[in-house]
Structures are given as structure tokens and as C-alpha cells.
Amino acid sequence: MQISTTSTEFKVNGDRLWASLMSLADIGATPKGGVCRLALTDLDRQGRDLFTSWARDCGCTVRVDAIGNIFARREGRNADLPPVMTGSHIDTQPTGGKFDGNYGVLAGLEVLRTLNDHNIQTEAPIEVVVWTNEEGSRFVPVMMGSGVFTDAFSIDTALDSTDRNNISVRTALKEIGYDGATPCRHFPINSYFEAHIEQGPVLEARQDVIGVVTGALGQRWYNVVVQGTESHAGSTPMELRKDALLAAASLIQEVNAIALVYPPDARGTVGWFDVFPNSRNVIPGKVSFSVDLRAPSDDILTRMDTALKAKCTQVGQDSNMSVSVEEVVYFPPQPFDEEKIAVVENMAGALGLPHSRLVSGAGHDAVYLARVCPSAMIFIPCKDGISHNEIEDATPEHIEAGCNVLLHAMLAQAGL
Ligand code: HGY
Ligand code: MN
Ligand code: MN
Ligand code: MN
């Protein structure tokens, strides 16, 4: 039966997509059913190798750029046309899940596999991309590969970034063999669509299947260091202490308080925290920690930034300790392209999928791609809105539904 590709009867193979997700999830699988596949580790290499072998099996050409972004390209009839692009990331959080990022990459691959199943050649080429180090867990800045690709920061800023063992991105990329030859710079792109789990509670609460993402919160990330003086927990009188942990505790409270000033969408989080020397009977001399601030407007984000820095100055003065604040990530809230948002919305409707619009609290590579081409995102729910957690879960039905919206949105752009 020849299915018209524009009919909503034309569907992806959900079982194949689910099986691919589970195979990829085996790489870095954790005992609680999650995935730990940190950026540019050997596990990341294994995942990259698996994706590129699958892409080549689909007849794609594969190129890798200088920051390790992988571009799997399926030619169209007209190679001169800018590609329709999709993708996401396969690096995960240390206690990550099977779907964050991995879903967007493999949904893109499933679109190619489905086109192959039906011998369909599009007018424009299609590219599926694996962006390097989207998570920003091992290396900052976050969304690193897409950030270099879209001039958000220079490639040297990225290559010189080091993890907490002082290993640079440059070294790690070379070690896994993904320091690609293709220069990392953006080129004309027809449009970019990214499929992703919502990672929050909204769609599930609304009982919607598709999230039509209108944009993403702006973010500012910092490294804060409080420098006090290690000394003996027993022989140092309370009034003579320079207890870095005590000073840091008031700053952590402040990060939370700053976000609560701007409900409902502002966010403040302290994710990682190092105490030195971390010994029971030594007053902590140095505390280092991260701050992650997010807001729906740049104005609110600026006010939160000002409040954080003011508090750090005040705590330093009051405690007579040094408090340093280094900003390591900044990007303003990013609206997606109205026309592409409407494409996603119309396809979800045509497929009879309950859908609604929402803003993404999480950052995604689409946030940077939106700077160089018309971009939009397709969300599906995740169980209890939980993500960045090994119990992250999604249903095969939603996984398939989101991929069908991606298929039709991309076909609408690529032309038949
Ligand atoms: O932090 C984020 O929003 C994303 O997971 N990188
Ligand atoms: Mn992600
Ligand atoms: Mn993530
Ligand atoms: Mn440019």
C-alpha cells in the first residue's frame, strides 16, 4: 500500500526506536536503571561509535567537527539546499536517565530509517546531529558543542575547559578520537527541530502527549569559592573562627531565596559542593560550589545576578573572608521560531495528539541553534516529571508519538 507521506497514516516504527533507545542505554547503564555516560569519556565514545555505525547503516555520510559534534547527513534530491536538521545529545548526568538527549538523537535516526523503509527521497538534505557535552556536568560551559557551532563562545574557550581532574576538553576529545577535522562553524540550515522529554511535571499534569515548546529560560551559572582558614575544631574559640562552610551556608539559603522572589518560573540551585579539607575535626577553610540561576526574562535574570553578587560581597565583609564569584555560563531566555512552533502544533493536531504550549525550564541545543536558524522543539512527558535522575522514564507510546510529530514536521520542511 503506497502511503502518502503527508498523510498521518505515515508513521515511524516505534518498536525499532524503543529498541535503539534501550541498546544505547546499555552503554553506561547504572544499577538503578539509569545511565552515566559523561561527556568525552570512553562510554561517550562507545555511544558515539554506535550512533555513527547506525547512521552509516542508514546510508548517511558522517562528519565530525573540531569540537566533536557528529553530523549524519542523508542527501536529498538537491544537495545545494540547506539541510533540515534535528538532533540532541548523548552525554548524560552522573545519575542520568535513558531518555534525556538520547531520545532526540535516536528520534532523528528513526526519521531517516522510516524514510528509507519507504524509499522516500526528500528535496532538501536532512542532518541528524549529536552535539558535544550538552549537559555541562563534566565540563562547562553547558551546551558546549552547539554553543561553539553558533558562535556563543569560541572553540578555544571550549577546548581549554577542564574537568575537576584538570583534564581539558582538547585532551579528552583526542583521547576518544572525536577531535574532528571539519571546522566547527554554522552554515545555512533550513530549520532545526529537537525532540526531548519535558523533564518537568507540566505535560503529565495537563494529560497532554506533545509539548509545543515556545522557548527556554535564560540561565546564569557561577563557581563560588569561600576562602576561610582551616583550624582545629576543639582548640579554636568560636569568635576566632573563619569557618568557610558557615559562610557558604548563608549563601546557599540566598540562592534559594533569590529564586523565590520571582515566582513561578525563576529557579535557583546549588548542584555541586566541595568542602576542604572535609575532615570531622577541622574547621572548613575553603568551600567551592556551583550556582545555577534561571529566569523567563533577562531583566529578572539580571536582578537575580545582582542580588547574588551583593550577598556574596556582604557575607565576605561580615565574615572577613574572601568570597569569589566567577560566571561560567550566560544566555538570555530564547524564544523559538513562531512559524516552526506552528508547524509542530499543526502536526500534533493532525496526528490527533493532545498538545499544549509551554516554556522549557531546561536548556537545550535548540536554544543556541535558534540563533542561526528557525528552530522549535517537541516535548513528550516523562514519568512524574522526573529527569536528571536514574529513574527517569517515558512510555513507548509517547516516544513514538513525539517521533511522528518530528517526522511530519521535518517532511513539511524538507519537501518531497
Ligand atoms: O541544565 C540544563 O538545562 C540541561 O540539562 N543542560
Ligand atoms: Mn537534555
Ligand atoms: Mn540534561
Ligand atoms: Mn557566525
Image: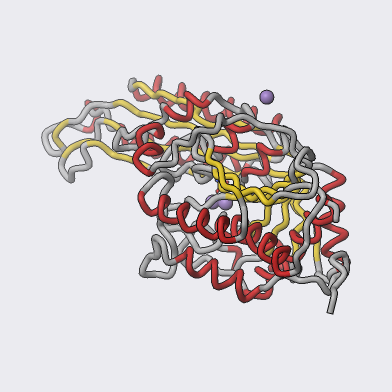
Could you tell me residue 42's position as x and y percent?
35, 50
Q: How is the image coloured?
A: secondary structure
At horizontal 50% and vertical 46% (from top left) the residue drawn is: 135
Please indicate whether residue 230 sits to the left or right of residue 187 in the image.
Answer: left
Could you tell me residue 191's position as x and y percent?
77, 43
Q: Is residue 384 above or below residue 359?
A: below
Which quadrant is home to the C terminus?
bottom right
Residue furthest out toward the left: 235
Q: Is residue 72 above or below residue 298?
A: below
Please indicate whether residue 333 sits to the left or right of residue 219 in the image.
Answer: right
At horizontal 52% and vertical 25% (from top left) the residue drawn is: 309
Q: Nearer the viewer, residue 61 or 381?
A: 61
> Is residue 100 among what the camera can see?
no
At horizontal 69% and vertical 68% (from top left) the residue drawn is: 204
Residue 412, image quadrant: bottom right
Please indicate whether residue 347 sits to the left or right of residue 395 in the image.
Answer: right
Q: Nearer the viewer, residue 219 or 110?
A: 110
Please indicate whether residue 400 sits to the left or right of residue 234 in the image.
Answer: right
Count of labels shown?
A: 0
At horizontal 68% and vertical 75% (from top left) the residue drawn is: 397
Residue 219, image quadrant: top right
Which quadrant is home to the N terminus?
bottom right
> Is residue 228 among what the camera can see?
yes
Could you tell me residue 39's position as x and y percent?
43, 46
Could you tell me residue 390's position as x and y percent?
45, 64
Q: Nearer the viewer, residue 339 or 264?
A: 339
